[in-house]
Image: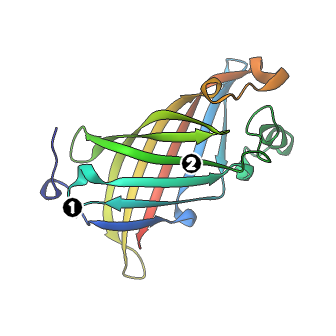
């Protein structure tokens, strides 16, 4: 499908900075195969470029791995160690888009490279463009929701002795509000 600026309500081309105060980067993973454990990352940044041709838009993002927060200190400390994120050895995880495909004027597949624990893999985010608007200070804002699922094993995240208790598939959800740069 092709899409154009005219088909996207209120579309604003430009460079945008992710607003961490009004954004959320969260994940969920099965525990013991029966329940989902949820968590988030508290420190992240990124830039989104909405191009004149929406399909030429791009995104880069970086997440501080030590900022993981699952509301349980003991679990968070374990996630930070070498069994999982190894935050001392790999303090950031990054995403860089490589292309966009339109499903509709407001839904896209964003292909890109995700680097976690020094391993880079191709992933696809399903992105919903929530819209463009005006912030309280009068400046333009944009909203996006993106989801993907990754295999932790693909990135060398074994989980150590606890690995069998933690599912391999991790669902990632990004709720992003961005300010025009």
Q: Is residue 131 left or right of residue 63?
A: left
Q: Which residue is mark 1?
A: 52
x, y (%) of residue 97? Answer: 41, 46
Q: Residue at x 27, y 52 (%)?
A: 56
Is 160 situated above or below 130?
A: above
- Picture mark count: 2
- Seen in the image, is 126 located left or right of residue 84? left
In the rendered view, tell whether residue 9 sits above or below residue 14. Answer: above
Secondary structure of the residue carrying tag 2 is strand
| Numbered disc 1: secondary structure | loop
Query: Of label 1 and label 2, which has the lower sequence position?
Result: 1
- In this rendered view, identify the residue nearer to me: 33 or 171: 171
Occupied quadrant, residue 154: top right
- The residue to which callout 2 is attached is 94
Quarter of the image where one finds residue 77: top right
In which quadrant will I find the C terminus?
Answer: bottom left
Q: Which mark is residue 181?
A: none
Percent of width and height locating residue 150: 54, 30
Give the residue furthest to the bottom. 137
Which residue shows up at 31% across the image and 58% down it?
Answer: 131
Q: Measure the alpha-carbon separation of dots 1 and 2.
A: 25 Å
Location of residue 163 with respect to 100 vertically, above or below: above
Image x and y of residue 35, in percent: 67, 24
């Amino acid at each position: 499908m092709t899409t154009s600026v005219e088909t996207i309500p209120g579309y604003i081309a430009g460079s945008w900075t992710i607003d961490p105060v009004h954004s959320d980067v969260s994940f969920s993973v099965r525990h013991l195969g029966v329940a989902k454990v949820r968590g988030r990352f508290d420190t992240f940044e990124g830039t989104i470029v909405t191009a004149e041709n929406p399909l030429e838009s791009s995104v880069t993002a970086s997440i501080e791995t030590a900022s993981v927060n699952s509301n349980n200190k003991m679990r968070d400390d374990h996630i930070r160690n070498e069994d999982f994120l190894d935050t001392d050895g790999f303090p950031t995880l990054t995403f860089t888009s490589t292309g966009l495909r339109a499903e509709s004027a407001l839904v896209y597949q964003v292909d890109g490279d995700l680097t976690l624990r020094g391993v880079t893999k191709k992933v696809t985010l399903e992105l919903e463009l929530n819209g463009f608007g005006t912030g309280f200070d009068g400046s333009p804002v944009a909203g996006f929701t993106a989801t993907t699922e990754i295999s932790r094993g693909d990135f060398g995240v074994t989980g150590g002795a606890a690995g069998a208790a933690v599912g391999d598939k991790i669902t990632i959800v990004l709720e992003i509000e961005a300010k025009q740069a």
